[in-house]
């Protein structure tokens, strides 16, 4: 094993659990324990969390990971979204993260994900594996089910996976280390107790062929 990923989602999405200072302290303690038994690289998931301001963590973390979603897309733009427009939005996101002084120019792995549902650009995340009554963060299982009322939109997801590699690799890639995607190993796209039809996964959808083409380059 060459590396170990650590996540920062809890710190940014659920600040009531840990303060930023507490999270930095616990992350540093965790990495020190990890380095005592593991000599590979440490990847931190959430480049904009700001923990790289800590001198120890700035040196200990080898790679950062962050995501491309619907950053900066307005409702009006979402109604007629195009590949060039989303590419430009993604590039703004990438440039903003890359230029953050707290990252010390460490390489970044971009996690590309966009659910295949029509309102994804103007609403928050929703759970894909069980019913909930609302949006993330912190939404738990519920008997009501907003997932069942969502409209599938494979074309929108395909645009996102067309635009992302263009933004990441076809211009000055700077300190980009790579791209990752969300992929469920499941051929069934019909919702039952899970909702692969509106999920981040590209499996069995038009975006899957775009992803294959991107990774072959």
Image (tube, helix red, strand yellow):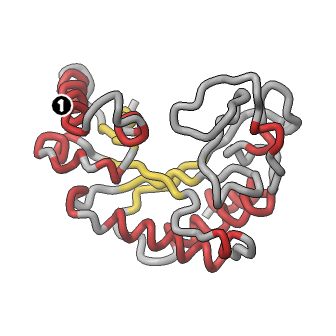
Horizontal and vertical percent position of residue 66: 43, 51
The residue that mark 1 highlights is: 25
Q: Quadrant of the N terminus?
A: top left
Q: Quadrant of the C terminus?
A: bottom right
- Residue in front for this viewpoint, 98 or 81: 81
Q: Residue at x 49, y 53 (%)?
A: 67
Q: Residue at x 51, y 51 (%)?
A: 111
Horizontal and vertical percent position of residue 85: 62, 78
Q: Residue at x 30, y 38 (%)?
A: 41
25 to 74, vertically: above or below: above
Is residue 107 rendered to the left or right of residue 81? left
97 to 113, vertically: above or below: below
Is residue 134 rendered to the left or right of residue 145? left
170 to 13, vertically: above or below: below
The answer to whether residue 3 is visible is no
The answer to whether residue 209 is visible is yes
Horizontal and vertical percent position of residue 149: 83, 42
Is residue 83 rendered to the left or right of residue 44? right
Horizontal and vertical percent position of residue 191: 85, 34
Label 1 element class: helix
């Amino acid at each position: 094993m060459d590396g170990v990923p650590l996540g920062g989602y809890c710190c940014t999405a659920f600040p009531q659990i840990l303060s930023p200072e507490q999270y930095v302290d616990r992350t540093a303690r965790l990495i020190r324990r990890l380095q005592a038994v593991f000599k590979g690289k440490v990847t931190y998931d959430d480049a904009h969390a700001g923990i790289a301001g800590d001198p120890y963590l700035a040196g200990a973390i080898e790679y950062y990971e962050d995501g491309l979603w619907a950053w900066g897309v307005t409702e009006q733009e979402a109604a007629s979204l195009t590949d060039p427009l989303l590419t430009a939005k993604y590039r703004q996101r990438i440039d903003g993260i890359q230029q953050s002084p707290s990252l010390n120019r460490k390489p970044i792995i971009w996690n590309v994900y966009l659910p295949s549902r029509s309102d994804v650009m103007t609403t928050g995340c929703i759970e894909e594996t069980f019913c909930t009554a609302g949006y993330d963060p912190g939404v738990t299982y519920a008997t009501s089910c907003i997932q069942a009322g969502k409209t599938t939109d494979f074309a929108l997801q395909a645009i996102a996976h067309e635009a992302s590699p263009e933004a990441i690799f076809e211009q000055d890639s700077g300190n980009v280390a790579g791209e990752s995607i969300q992929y469920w190993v499941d051929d069934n796209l019909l919702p039952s107790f899970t909702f692969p039809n509106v999920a981040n996964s590209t499996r069995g959808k038009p975006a899957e062929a775009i992803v294959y083409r991107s990774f072959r380059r």
